Image (cartoon, coloured by chain):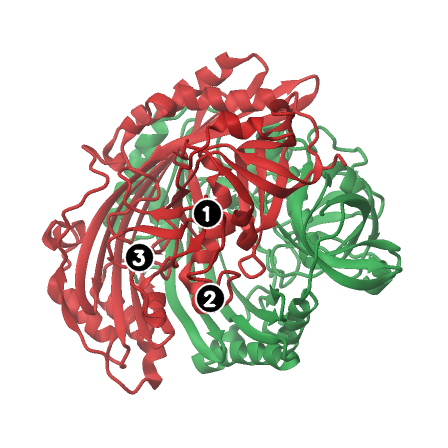
Chain colours: A red, B green
């Protein structure tokens, strides 16, 4: 993985000397640190709707971002091409914030990192694959969803892929590049019966090529699951209102951890003391059953990265161990200012964005309980197995998320399905209320999109079956 | 880059025709942006850039494909045009596909007063100081304001050029700016964040920095000590920022794309009463100086004013050329190009018209109820109208604010919520292209302790 093998050196004529020139321009007003982020990204997206291939889209994005840090200040600028003069101009613009800094920054010549690990080896990158093969996935899912039940009246299936080349060079002497594949298939179904309409949704993917779409991720399996959810909702009853015991199913319900805990543990919010978790390292924030991990190193996973968007290798970071808070997710800036080790969580949407501490694949480790026993132990509660989206207020710690498939539990039995139940709770206390953790950890199927400060990035979440003593369910039935 | 945007759009159109496209349109956007965030009186981030994007749509008969690129240099675009035409050949025939009918295009455009050149005379230091003053005002409001997520000033000067093979060609330019403040209030037991912002195209449209900082601080402070309340059913008052999210749901529900997919709770209801008689909603692309105004939409359809709901009666859905053909309607000038280049439905200035009540009067009319200041989560089902979102607010008793409330949800169904709008405030607040005044809804279920 020598720098000269990156597309920027091979096809766009970037040289090591250029990198030095740009970094040196960026530090010309005395910043402490500067880095360069080159990106060349190719996207495809194809949509099937009303039984036809409605549209196909290709996107090409090429540019370079320059960041200068001076104390706690960050200057950022970018160029929409790799023209030398434009990148130098961006470097001068980014340097603006350093004008009051007295000390001049020093430049170490960027040398390539040893990059042996590849978490996503693929024979062919999605950008190179035939459009016809991708269209075939959509057709298979459309047929399978409609064949599932005649009440499925509409199927909207979409395929998206991304092939992203990045190159990073830093003034503290590091240079590295990566090539990242990403594919995803989503199927949305609408079921209709007696004038009632309900929707179902399922997707899957990962950092692979089209070979990811087998087994549970076979387009037909994804489609049938989407159809099943839509049909199920036709007989769902209104959600209850008020506090109750809640069991979360394994896999995608891990979005609760992501929202309620994960965001609050991103280092920037804790450095600025705006998170409800600020200052709690070493303290008990959850029951002893809870161990929470962010792991960017799982092969082929949607949230995995060989290196983060600041050129640092990703890690497995234990955030909470047996209920005790261990640390935060760091990017370079927060790690310096908090004097904490890097965790490889500096991520950005693209070259026109500043890196921020972000999650990768975030999940809770398995416990000892059998999932059946957890359900049996509940007299009256809610069993939530599939979710729409969620959101958190970092400062107050309150989070909300919506179950798109949930059931009542009555006397240890799963009974009626309920419509879109919203769960609302408090991040810093929800883990204290975990009273059972199943032995069935599962990661989601590879569809997570996380938003922060206007930047979206791919992530994964995971969870074993867990029981929470009390969460407020926001339905309409008192 | 010596060519004007219009020259480039013309070249791309010509190239598409040569590659075998039977029709095509292309849009180029160029944004000159400056943004600064100040936190605790120091610059935290400063970002400045010129960015371009080219969005192309081609038709080969009634098959279509789109593409987009940030790199508008000749060879890259030429290759992309060819690839887009090739992709179009692989998609399906769609009888509703195609550019808008030529009869809809005009070549004279209304001057909507979108540009304020005086922004350019502000130096970077003056722009930074707008954010500094805003945050300072928040800190000076009260000693409980002990921290901040910062104050930001964002400015963009944007040019848009659009051309198609039917002979349409147009270009416009506009400025937008926003000043936002996010202070944090802290007491012994509670930490709360809130925000206030002001946005506009012209300098005079922005509230003074001191005003914004003070309002933001007031909003954060009044949330201190927030508690849960028991599950109940009461009237709900939405402040203009939270009411804006309700208008966003209505916008989605009247979008032609949701209608032809039958994935909206407002499908098949033109001419029917869908809201209380106090509700009048319009989408007005012609509002002078409006944040969502533009002389033509992203397909070249001229700006128009579209009544959506008039005194409770549903009048129109919003259409682009494609959805209009699907639904046998006329385009309403709401074609909007996503970053991917695909045309979808977008709002222009989509707002609920002001009523006669001052916000205070609305609050005073409530015996017991909740004044909502923030909504979180995504618990809205557009197909059924089922609604359940997390809410933060202030409890009202006998027409007066009593204490702040959090960790509750409010739930109902959008159909009922629209019909139960009992009072409409006179305080429509534009901070984007969707806006609303203070609204009172007769009753909803609050789920809490």
Task: Look at the picture and state if A478 lies above or below B435.
Answer: above
* Quadrant of the rendered image containing residue B400: bottom right
Q: Earlier in the sequence, mark 2 or mark 1?
A: 2
Label 1 crowd (10 A; few <14 / some 14-19 / many >=20): some
In the displayed structure, A394 sits above or below B420; it is below
Give yes or no for contact between labels 3 and 1 (Cβ–Cβ under 8 Å): no
Which percent across, then down, holds residue B426? 80, 61
- Left or right: A103 as drawn, with respect to A141: left
What residue is pinned by disc 1? A288
Viewer-proximal residue, A285 or B414?
A285
Vertical order, A84 against B422 (above or below): below
Residue name at image x 30 percent, y 52 percent: B71
Any mark on residue A343, and which?
Answer: 3
Measure the alpha-carbon separation of dots 3 and 1: 24 Å
Q: Earlier in the sequence, mark 3 or mark 1?
A: 1
Give the mark toward the camera: 3 or 1. Answer: 1
| Residue picked out by circle 2 | A279
Task: Please state the horizontal and vertical placement of residue B401, each as a whole percent of the image.
Answer: 80, 63
Q: Is residue B102 left or right of residue B390?
A: left
Chain bearing tag 2 is A
Is disc 1 on the same chain as disc 2?
yes
In which chain is the residue bearing label 3? A
The mark lying in front, picked from 3 and 2, is: 2
């Amino acid at each position: 993985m020598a720098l000269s093998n990156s597309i920027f050196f091979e096809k766009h004529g970037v040289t090591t000397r250029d990198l030095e020139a740009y970094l040196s321009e960026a530090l010309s007003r005395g910043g402490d640190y500067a880095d360069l982020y080159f990106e060349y990204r190719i996207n495809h997206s194809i949509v099937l709707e009303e039984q036809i291939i409605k549209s196909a889209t290709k996107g090409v994005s090429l540019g370079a971002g320059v960041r200068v840090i001076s104390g706690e200040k960050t200057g950022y600028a970018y160029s929409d091409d790799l023209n030398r003069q434009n990148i130098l101009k961006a470097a001068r613009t980014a340097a603006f914030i350093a004008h009051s800094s007295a000390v001049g920054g020093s430049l170490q010549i960027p040398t390539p990192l040893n990059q042996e690990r590849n978490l996503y080896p693929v024979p062919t990158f999605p950008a190179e694959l035939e459009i016809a093969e991708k269209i075939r996935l959509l057709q298979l899912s459309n047929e399978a969803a409609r064949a599932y039940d005649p009440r499925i009246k509409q199927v909207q299936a979409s395929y998206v892929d991304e092939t992203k080349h990045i190159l990073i060079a830093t003034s503290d002497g590091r240079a590295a590049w990566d090539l990242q594949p990403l594919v995803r298939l989503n199927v949305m179904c609408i079921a209709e019966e007696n004038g009632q309409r309900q929707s179902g949704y399922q997707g899957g993917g990962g950092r692979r090529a089209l070979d990811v779409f087998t087994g549970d991720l076979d387009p037909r399996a994804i489609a049938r699951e989407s159809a099943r959810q839509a049909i199920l909702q036709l007989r769902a009853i209104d959600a209850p209102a008020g506090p109750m015991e809640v069991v979360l199913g394994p896999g995608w319900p891990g979005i609760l951890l992501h929202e309620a805990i994960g965001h609050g543990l991103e280092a920037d919010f804790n450095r600025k003391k705006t998170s409800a978790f600020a200052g709690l390292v070493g303290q008990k924030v959850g029951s002893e059953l809870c161990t929470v991990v962010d792991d960017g190193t799982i092969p082929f996973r949607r949230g995995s990265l060989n290196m983060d968007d600041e050129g640092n290798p990703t890690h497995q970071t234990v955030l909470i161990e047996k209920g005790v808070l261990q640390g935060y997710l760091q990017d370079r800036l927060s790690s310096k200012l908090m004097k904490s080790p890097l965790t490889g969580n500096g991520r950005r949407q693209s070259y026109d964005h500043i890196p921020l501490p972000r999650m990768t694949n975030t999940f809770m480790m398995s416990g000892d309980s059998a999932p059946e026993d957890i359900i049996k132990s509940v007299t009256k509660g809610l069993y939530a197995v599939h979710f729409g989206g969620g959101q958190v207020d970092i400062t107050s710690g309150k989070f909300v998320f919506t179950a798109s498939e949930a059931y009542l539990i009555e006397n240890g039995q799963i009974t009626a399905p309920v419509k879109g139940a919203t769960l609302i709770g408090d991040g810093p206390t929800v883990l204290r209320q975990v009273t059972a953790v199943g032995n069935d950890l599962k990661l989601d199927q590879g569809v997570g999109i996380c938003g922060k400060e206007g930047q979206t990035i791919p992530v994964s979440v995971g969870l074993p079956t867990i029981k929470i003593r009390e969460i407020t369910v926001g339905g309409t039935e008192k | 880059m010596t060519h004007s945007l219009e020259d480039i759009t013309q070249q791309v159109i010509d190239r598409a025709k040569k590659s075998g496209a039977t029709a095509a349109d292309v849009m180029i956007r160029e944004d000159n942006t400056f943004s600064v965030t100040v936190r605790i009186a120091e610059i935290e981030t400063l970002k400045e850039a010129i960015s371009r994007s080219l969005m192309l749509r081609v038709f080969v008969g009634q098959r279509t494909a789109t593409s987009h690129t940030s790199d508008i240099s000749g060879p890259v675009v030429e290759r992309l045009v060819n690839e887009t035409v090739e992709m179009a050949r692989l998609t399906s025939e769609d009888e509703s596909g195609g550019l808008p009918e030529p009869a809809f295009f005009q070549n004279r455009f209304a001057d909507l007063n979108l540009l304020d050149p005086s922004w350019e005379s502000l130096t970077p230091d003056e722009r930074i100081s707008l954010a500094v003053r805003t945050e300072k005002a928040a800190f000076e409001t009260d000693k409980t304001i002990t921290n901040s997520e910062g104050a930001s000033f964002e400015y963009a000067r944007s040019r848009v050029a659009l051309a198609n093979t039917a002979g349409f060609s147009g270009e416009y330019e506009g400025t937008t700016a926003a000043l936002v403040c996010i202070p944090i209030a802290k007491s012994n037991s509670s930490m709360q964040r809130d925000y206030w912002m002001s946005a506009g195209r012209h300098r005079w449209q922005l509230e003074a920095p001191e005003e914004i900082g003070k309002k933001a601080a007031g909003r954060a402070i009044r949330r201190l000590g927030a508690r849960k309340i028991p599950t109940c059913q009461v009237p709900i008052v939405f402040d203009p920022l939270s009411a804006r999210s309700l208008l966003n749901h209505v916008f989605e529900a009247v979008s032609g794309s949701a209608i032809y997919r039958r994935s909206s709770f407002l499908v098949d209801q033109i001419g029917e009463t869908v809201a209380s008689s106090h509700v009048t909603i319009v989408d007005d692309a012609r509002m002078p100086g409006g944040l969502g105004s533009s002389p033509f939409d992203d397909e070249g359809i001229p700006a128009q004013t579209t009544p959506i709901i008039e005194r409770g009666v549903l009048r129109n859905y919003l259409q682009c050329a494609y959805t209009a053909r699907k639904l046998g309607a006329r385009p309403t000038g709401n074609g909007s190009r996503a970053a991917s280049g695909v045309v979808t439905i977008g709002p222009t200035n989509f707002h609920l018209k002001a009523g006669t009540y001052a916000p205070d009067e609305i609050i005073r009319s409530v015996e017991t109820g909740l004044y909502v200041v923030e909504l979180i989560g995504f618990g809205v089902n557009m197909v059924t109208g089922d609604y359940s979102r997390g809410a933060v607010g202030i409890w009202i008793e006998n027409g007066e604010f009593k204490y702040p409330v959090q960790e509750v949800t409010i739930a109902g169904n959008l159909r009922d919520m629209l019909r139960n709008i009992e009072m409409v405030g006179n305080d429509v607040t534009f901070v984007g292209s969707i806006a609303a005044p203070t609204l009172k809804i007769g009753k909803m279920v609050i789920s809490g302790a």
